[in-house]
Image (tube, rainbow, N blue to C red):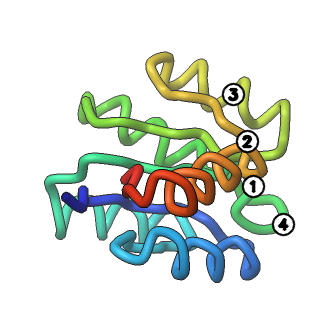
Amino acid sequence: MSQATLVVEDNTNRRHWFVHHVPQAFLVEGNDEAIRVFEQFAPWDNIILDFDLAPGIDSVPFARYLAEVKFNGHVVVSSENPFGMQVLSRILPTAEVLPFHLLRREVEWAWGVAGEELF
């Protein structure tokens, strides 16, 4: 069964990957859009959150928003930025920290071997 998944990611290659491997996911690029979509299409089961959204812009505002509204779904911090992973995990202490290259491997394994959806 598909779960409602919101992906906050600006990298074009990663967005393309999500479209093909997590097709039911809703993709957004920035904090304002993430908050708007989060509120408009709630409830969400999963949030996949990158730290670096554009040069000089990070996802801290959206992470703080999730903490403020006490989001109790599954959050995956999928950044490749070690500093960013630490920052987001401090704001969202229950988040799973899984750099994108490991997230990609897990999803591709689940789809290729098990034939099941992770999200």
Q: Which residue corresponds to mark 4?
A: 55
Looking at this view, is 55 or 41 the one in front? 41
- Mark 4 residue crowding within 10 angstroms, few (<14) / some (14–19) / many (20+): few
Q: Which comes sooner in the sequence, label 3 or label 1?
A: 1
Distance CA(mark 3)–CA(mark 1): 11 Å
Q: Residue at x 30, y 69 (%)?
A: 37
Which mark, residue 99? Answer: 2
Distance CA(mark 2)–CA(mark 1): 12 Å
Distance CA(mark 4)–CA(mark 2): 19 Å
Mark 2 or mark 1, whichever is nearer to me: 2
Tell whether 26 sits left or right of 49: left
As drawn, the residue found furthest toward the front would be 113
Q: Which comes sooner in the sequence, label 2 or label 3?
A: 3
Q: Is mark 3 on a helix, strand or loop?
A: helix
Mark 4 or mark 1, whichever is nearer to me: 1
Q: Residue at x 63, y 76 (%)?
A: 15
97 w.r.t. 110: above or below: above
Q: Quadrant of residue 34?
A: bottom left
Q: What type is the residue that disc 3 sits on?
A: Val
- Across and down, in percent, residue 13 comes to 76, 79
- Mark 3 residue crowding within 10 angstroms, few (<14) / some (14–19) / many (20+): some
105 w.r.t. 21: above or below: above
Mark 4 or mark 2, whichever is nearer to me: 2
Looking at this view, is 99 or 71 the one in front? 99
Which mark, residue 87? Answer: 3
Distance CA(mark 4)–CA(mark 1): 7 Å
Kindly check if marks 2 and 3 are in contact, taking CB atoms under 8 A apart as contact.
no
Which mark, residue 52? Answer: 1
- Across and down, in percent, residue 33 comes to 42, 71
Kindly check if marks 3 and 4 are in contact, taking CB atoms under 8 A apart as contact.
no
Q: Residue at x 19, y 58 (%)?
A: 1
Q: What type is the residue that disc 1 sits on?
A: Asp
